[in-house]
Amino acid sequence: MTARILGIETSCDETAIAVVEDGRRILSNVVASSSQFHAVYGGVVPDIAARVHVEVIWQVLEDALAQAHVRVEELDAVAVTSGPGLPGALLIGLAFAKGLALALNRPLIGIDHLAAHLYAGSMTDETLKLPYVGLVVSGGHTLLCVAHPQQRFEVLGETKDDAVGEAFDKVAKLLGLGYPGGPVIDRLSDEGRAEAIPFSRSSAKDGFDFSFSGLKTAVYQYVQKQTQGIAECGLRNADCSIRNPKSEIRNSLGRQQVADVAASFQEAAVDILVTKTLRACQRTGLTRLVVGGGVAANRRLRQRLLEAGRLRNLQVVFPPPALCVDNGAMVAGVAFEQLQAGARAPLSLTIDPNRRLN
C-alpha cells in the first residue's frame, strides 16, 4: 500500500516541508532558509528563526503540495521533528503538524532530527544495510554512532564543545567571510594551501569524542599574531578604534593568506573527522558508513572519506547536497518506517530540545 507522508522540519533556521512516498520517492522537498537574517549576527538568532518560521510555514506547505501534485487530503501521515533543536523553532513546527494531523485525522509521528539526517543516506542508496557506522556533522552536532535495526542507535562519541559546523562558522566570522561559514570556506579553500599552516589535530584524545575548541583557538591565535590585535576586535566585538575590524583582517592578511588559513583549518577539521570515523569502522568491524548533516556537503570531507572507503573496502554513503541540509524529505522518509511499525504520537507530543540519539 502506498503511503504519502508530509515531513516538517523546523529545528533551526530552515523552514522545510516535503512529501515523500513509501519512504524513498521524494515528490517534493521545499526549503526556505532565514540565513540572510542571521548573517549580520554571524550566527543563528533563535528568536528570529522562530519568527520567520511563523511567517513562511504556510507558504512552504502550499509550495510542497503543489510541487508534489498532491492534495492535503491525500496525505497518509504527518511527521515532524520534535528534537533536538532550538526550542522556539521546534514549537512552531510541532504546533503546525499537530493542527494538520488533527484537521485531517491522520497519524502524527515525532522524529529525531539526528536519526533523520542518517536516514537521508539510505533514501538514495537502496543497497545500504544495517548495522552501519553513522557520522552526523552539522552546525549543532558532531556525533559518531552505530545504527542498528528498528531505529536503535549506539552513540560512540560526540563533541565536547563546538560542533564542527559551528567551528566553520566562527572561523569564517573571524576572517570576515560571512555566514554561513561552511560553504564559503569550502569554496575559498580551492585557492589556498592546505599544508600552509600546521594547525593542531588533537581532539579529545584517542577516543571517539570530538573537540574543536582547540583548533578554533589555534586559528584565532594565528590570525591575532598576523594582524597585530585586529582579530580580537573582529571576534570579540571589543571596543577599539578600528571601524571595520573584519574588513581590516582581510586587508591585513591579503586574499592568499586568508585562503591559506581557510584551507589549513578545513584540512585540520576534516583530518579529525576522518581519523575518528575510520577508527570507529575498524573497532566495530563494520564496513558500512553513512555521513549526514550540513557539513556532509563539504567537498573535502566527501573526497577524503570516499577515497578511504575505496582503499579499505568500505561502503561510504553520502546523501546528495540537497539532503545534507535540514530538510523535510529526511523527516518524512524515516517516518515511513515508523508508520509501518505502527508508531503513532499522541497530540500531547512535546518537543525535546536536548534529545539524545538512542
Image (cartoon, grey):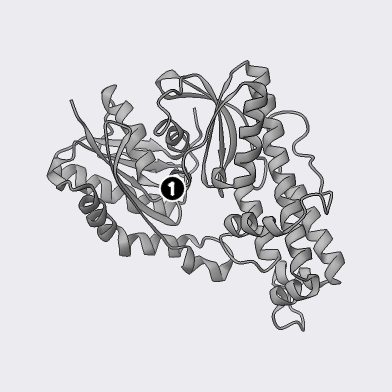
Q: Count numbered badges in the picture.
A: 1
- Residue furthest to the top in view is 285
Question: Percent position (x, y) of residue 323?
Answer: 43, 44
Question: Percent position (x, y) of residue 128?
Answer: 46, 23
Question: Quick check: can you spot residue 297?
Answer: yes
- Residue 287 shown left or right of residue 98 in the figure: right
- Residue 222 shown left or right of residue 113 in the figure: right
Residue linked to disc 1:
322
Check the picture and name the quadrant holding the N terminus. Answer: top left
In the picture, residue 181 is in which quadrant? bottom right
Residue 356 vs residue 272, the one in the foreground: 272
In the picture, residue 178 is in which quadrant? bottom right
- Residue 153 shown left or right of residue 25 in the figure: right
On screen, 209 above or below 18?
A: above
Three-letter amino acid code at the position of disc 1: Ala
On screen, 62 above or below 175?
A: above
Question: Percent position (x, y) of residue 92?
Answer: 34, 54
> Which residue does the image show at 46% across and 20% down from the upper left?
129
> Which residue does the image show at 19% across and 29% down from the upper left?
2
> Which residue does the image show at 77% across and 69% down from the upper left?
232
Circle 1 crowding by C-alpha within 10 Å: few under 14, some 14–19, many from 20: some
Question: Quick check: can you spot residue 163?
Answer: no
Q: Kindly state the secondary structure of the residue where label 1 is placed.
A: helix
On screen, 265 above or below 228?
A: above
Question: Percent position (x, y) of residue 14?
Answer: 42, 55
